[in-house]
Image: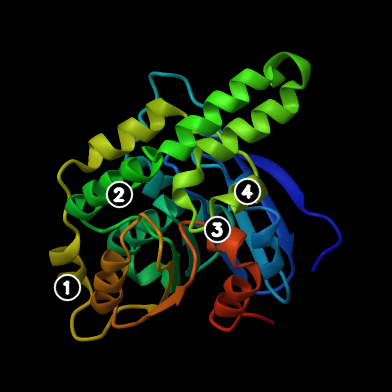
Amino acid sequence: MSRAPTESTVDLNGVRLYTRRVGDGPPVVVLHGGPGAHHDYLLPQYDRLAERRALLYYDQRGGGRSPVSRDVVVGWREHVADLEALRDHWRLDRLTLLGYSWGGLLAVLYALEHPDRIARLALVSAAPVTAAWREEFERRFAARMAQPWIARSRAELTALGLAKSDPERYRRIAFALSVAGYFRDPSHAREMTPFRVTERTRRAVWESLGDYDLRPRIRQTFPDSTAPRSLLLHGIDDPMPIEAARETAKLLSTGVIELATGHAPHVEATEDFVLGLDGFLPKG
């Protein structure tokens, strides 16, 4: 792995995108979740994959260090167009995409728009390819966040008065509680790098997708086992339904590496996460 990451910004499609590169070797483009989040919360664990390959991260438009004004459109088509513009900017003929959560769905959307530009797809805890499964995720996550222990923990945190006496510790604990429902073991939530989601971007992407169902288009675009080489990795206790991951895997003529985690396998099972992906992603 190279000694230090390199960072830059690039102007494409009327927006300025923050990019980060780490490692040397065959390139892998990493797509973070959200929508409207940023790449930082995949670190430091994802950087473990930068052995004998280069990881190309970027903050997607409307999130993190790629902010946009409120009049800039941030729907799914714009996200796909940005990725295609980055491919051209990086002078890559075909892409290996490593997509996490919403980034997994973005990878599929890109593959459907540019099937000849895909070399490999690695989908980690990917958002579903149908709105129905996404609604089921929202139901499962809401049920987890409604558990009494979370309300009690929030009340106890407020009573401690840390917001004034130790604001950094307060923010850290409050963040862990806000994402506890994503984890098989909520104690691991404090190990995740905190992140923020730009609500306008999040809402705009899902509204642009509407009542989506990508299954017919996947079958039409990749008939008879012609899908690009693909791999899915998913936690069996992920509120993002593993049933949806299994269905997507069948559509892509592949399988699912199922780990005993929730939605963040890179945090809850880092070694298994690295092992599962390292053998699939290209390396020099």
Q: Is residue 255 visible?
A: yes
Q: Distance between the residues labelled 1 and 3?
A: 25 Å
Residue position marked by numbered label 3 in the rendering? 30
Number of marks in picture: 4
Q: Residue at x 65, y 73 (%)?
A: 271
Q: Considering the image in quadrants, where does the C terminus appear?
A: bottom right
Residue position marked by numbered label 1 in the rendering? 219
Residue 201 appears at what percent x and percent y? Answer: 40, 31
Q: Residues within 10 Å of mark 2 (few under 14, many from 20)?
A: some
Please give the label number shown on residue 140.
2
Q: How far apart are marks 2 and 4 (CA)?
A: 21 Å
Q: Which residue is drawn at 17% across and 65% down?
A: 215
Q: Which of 122 and 14 is in front in this view?
A: 122
Q: Is label 1 or label 2 in front?
A: 2
Secondary structure, mark 2, is helix
Task: Locate residue 108: give its quadrant.
Answer: bottom left
Q: How crowded is mark 3: few (under 14 residues within 10 Å), some or many (20 or more)?
A: many
